Image (cartoon, rainbow, N blue to C red):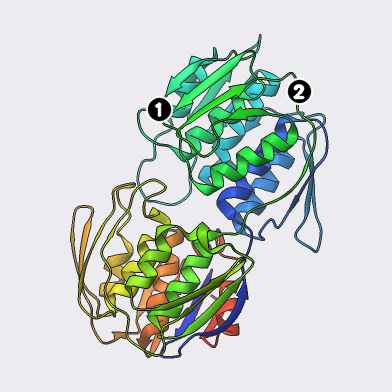
Amino acid sequence: MDSLIIRGGNRLGGTLTASGSKNAALPIMAATLLTPESCTLHRVPILRDTDTMVTLLSSLGAEVSRRDDKAMALQSSALHQLKAPYELVKTMRASILVLGPLLARYGRAEVSFPGGCAIGSRPVDLHIRVLEAMGAVVEVAEGYIIADAPTGLSGAEFTFDTVTVGGTENAVMAAVLATGTTVLRNVAQEPEIIDLLGFLQQMGAKIEGVGTDTLTIEGVASLSGASYHVMPDRIEVGTYLVAAAATGGRVRIEGVAPAALGVVRDALQQTGAVLSEGADWICLDMEGRRPQAVDIVTAPFPGFPTDMQAQFIALNTIAEGRSTVIETVFENRLMQAHEMKRMGAEIDIDGDTARITGRPALQGAPVMASDLRASASLVIAGLVASGETRIDRIYHIDRGYENIEGNLQCLGADIRRISA
């Protein structure tokens, strides 16, 4: 099993190009199941999760091939399997996103309950309820969600009790081929949702209300293939900018519109960093200073993203002042704080709240990653710690960060990967 070895103390400096978004690529890849025609996706990141989705789609009978330029060709002309098995789904929660497309196009789907990061229950009841509202008969048996709609899905009105990204994605993908009109209320509005909607519209889907909390979808008989560029990964960009701020460095990220960072950009400015930007780049310069502590409360978009919470906790551990970080989206998502305490961080955990007193430095130590974003936060902690930090179970980080050690090496970090 691979580990990362980091010797901290170097200020990050240099330029990177943003990768394609994992959280946008995965639902878009699943959406190609909605058409028998060929689709080409550009800027698909090379990650463990996208590889898992390729394996899952291929197991269903789709033809998937990669090119060197990160373009991916996908065609689902004749699937021979409508079951997403536990062996694949257990490693990645996004596997559940084949449920809506399979049911919409073929009238049946069997999908194992999903796995992924250990950051709470993240129930799938809303996925099931919205499909039932559209006429599907759904049962849960032996760990599988089994959905049937032999005469097809029908348009319906449905209001989500809570905002759910995956539930919104599955519902929209099911609705685009349903008979009649579907109205979905209280939908998620993350940029990655907007990217999926853009891809579906390019395929011929009729969707109104993009960018609002209510979507109106008029079902069509069929969708065509499309060529589409996946959006840049705003969480990856934010992670490298936080790492630059924590180390007192200067990093420029190209290939991303600064507005995509949303409130993360505001939080970075609160650290005392100097931000400059253009149409497709952003630069953070801490000018060698120690960052200021920042209070964070996570919330669904357009609030502060839960996927950036752990990185800011790492920054706050060495920032000037005290801070409070409150996680409202997922339970059990402060586990990385216990590992940071092994490095000398002063963090008090009370339920979903972390209270942090910044210290001038951390001390390198062996730590273990518990989930994807926790992995990134431990990397940041290692970059600012004195001595050597060893991070185990980094298969989590490979799920969402493309060549993280190579990118950080380009920025001047002393980091390497070893195999046990």
Furthest toward the top, the residue is 151
The amino acid marked with disc number 2 is: Ser
In-image side of 308 versus 255 (left or right): left
Q: Which residue: 41% across, 76% down?
A: 380
Q: Position of residue 403 (x, y in %)?
A: 61, 71
Residue 58 position by quadrant? top right
Q: Is residue 416 visible?
A: yes
Looking at numbered disc 1 in the image, what kind of residue is underneath it? Phe
In the drawing, what numbered circle is on residue 160? 1
Q: Position of residue 188 (x, y in %)?
A: 46, 38
Q: Secondary structure at mark 1?
A: loop
Is residue 418 among the parts visible in the rendering?
no
Where residue 219 sits: x, y (%)? 65, 20
Q: Element under label 2? A: loop
* In the image, residue 57 above or below residue 240: above
User: Residue 222, which numbered label?
Assistant: 2
Instruction: Check whether the beta carbons of the residues at disc 1 and disc 2 lie within 8 A of each other.
Output: no
Label 1 crowd bin: few (<14), some (14–19), many (20+), radius 10 Å: some
